[in-house]
Amino acid sequence: MNYTTVLWDLDGTILDSGPGIFESFRKTFEAMGLPQISDEQMRTFLGPPLRVTFSEHLGLSPLDTERALEIYKGFYLPAGAANASLYPGVIEAIQSIRSAGIATSLATSKAIGGVLVVGEHFDFLHLFDFLGTASLEANRLSKVDVMTYALDGLKQLGADLSKVLLVGDRIHDVEGARHHGVDVALVKWGYGTPEEWAQADYVLESPADLLKLLKISQDVV
């Protein structure tokens, strides 16, 4: 059966957001008097929700976690978000997927504020039928919760959810897909590791691999 809907992770899958995220983390650490860490260590921060990164990865107290979140957003939203780049060929692949009649939605742990900033800057929001984003207010933080939100939104729009594929780059994408009983493809151009790729149904070397998996001609626009 061909896939009828594709859910998309954002950071590390569509967008190389590492430079802006790393910069915002550095400024947050400096503002809070925390020691700086290497880019290699910060690579592990791309994927999980920010609250998980500050509380679990960095071991901050609940109070300091909330303070760090506010400081981070103060740096990231005005300037850090735009310090990013689109991965080559991904936007064109999404356009081809839509042209083939397949529903598309974001399923990202980034909150709507950050999604709107980068989406408007890079002009890709129109490529998605629904924006599945994280939300502190709605207690929608994990990839499982974000996918639930995206799938519910697509269902209300009448999308065909009989065969869903999630495209991401980290183990959290695999965990979310497994919870929802959908297939997952991890991209090798993001921030994942060979150990994470081994848990996926598919591993993609390039956007062309995704179109081949979906049986879509690369000249579809």
Image (cartoon, rainbow, N blue to C red):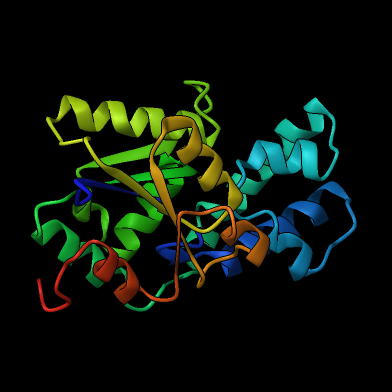
Image coordinates of residue 117 in percent, x first then y, are: 39, 53
Q: Residue furthest top?
A: 138
Position in image of residue 28 (x %, y %): 74, 52
Residue at the image position 20 percent from the left and 27 percent from the top: 155
Residue 83 lies, with reference to residue 153, above or below; the image says below
In x, y percent, where is residue 7? 33, 47
User: 31 above or below 207?
Assistant: above
Nearer-the-camera pick, 189 or 185:
185
Q: Is residue 132 or residue 1 the one in the foreground?
A: 1
The x and y percentages for residue 96 are: 16, 66
Q: Is residue 21 visible?
A: yes
Number of on-image labels: 0
Q: Which residue is drawn at 82% across and 56% down?
A: 30
Quadrant of the rendered structure where residue 158 is? top left
Q: In this view, does 85 lie above or below 106?
A: below
The answer to whether residue 9 is seen in the rendering is no
- Residue 99, by quadrant, is bottom left
Quarter of the picture holding the C terminus: bottom left
User: Residue lying furthest front in this view?
Assistant: 1
Query: Which residue occupies 49% across, 31% down?
Result: 179
Say whether residue 128 is left or right of residue 122: left
> In terms of depth relative to the viewer, which is nearer, 176 or 33?
176
